[in-house]
Image: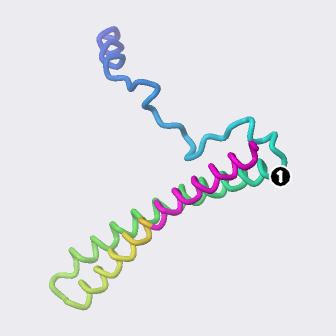
Amino acid sequence: MLNLFAATVSAYQIDPSYQPINSPFSLKDDIKDKGSAGALVVVLQMIASGLLYFAAPIAIIMLGFGAFNMVSGSGESEKIDQAKKHLTWSLIGLIVIILSYSIVKIVITLAITNAST
């Protein structure tokens, strides 16, 4: 029975090249040796990853809260309008979080290339 389980698990393993890393940015060892520019990159990476792990779940929870309020509004236009505002601002917040991740990634990439030269 154990061999069958092990064979099944090994058949459904994800190729390691497709597995995500645990941090949003890969912290390269050569960045740390670049002086103040390298220190700035490391600080930006730590701040961005901390905020990303904090803000994204809150935005998802607020989306669920807005959807629950819309469903439980039971036809009252005031509650439904308020729920629509919750949903709208939650989606805008989620989009801003995703864009901020991209912007920080671009800034870090530019800082790494400038520190390398």
Nearer to me, 11 or 32: 32
- Count of marks, rendered view: 1
Residue 64 is left or right of residue 16, and the answer is left
Q: Is residue 98 above or below residue 113?
A: below
Mark 1, other Cα within 10 Å: few <14 / some 14–19 / many ≥20: few
Q: Residue furthest right?
A: 35
Q: Amino acid at mark 1?
A: Ser
User: Which residue does the image show at 53% across and 37% down from the upper left?
Assistant: 21
User: Which residue does the image show at 26% across and 86% down from the upper left?
Assistant: 81
Figure quadrant of the C terminus: top right
The secondary structure type at the circle numbered 1 is: helix
Residue 58 is left or right of residue 63, and the answer is right
Q: Is residue 25 magenta?
A: no
Q: Residue furthest left?
A: 75
Nearer to me, 89 or 117: 117
Q: Is residue 100 magenta?
A: yes
- Residue 16 is situated, as x and y percent measured from the top left of the image, at 46, 25
Nearer to me, 2 or 80: 80
Q: Which residue is mark 1?
A: 36
- Residue 84 is situated, as x and y percent measured from the top left of the image, at 28, 80
Q: Which residues are magenta?
A: 96-117
Q: Quadrant of residue 3?
A: top left
Q: Quadrant of residue 67?
A: bottom left
Magenta highlight: main SS: helix
Residue 19 is left or right of residue 109, and the answer is left
- Residue 17 is situated, as x and y percent measured from the top left of the image, at 46, 27
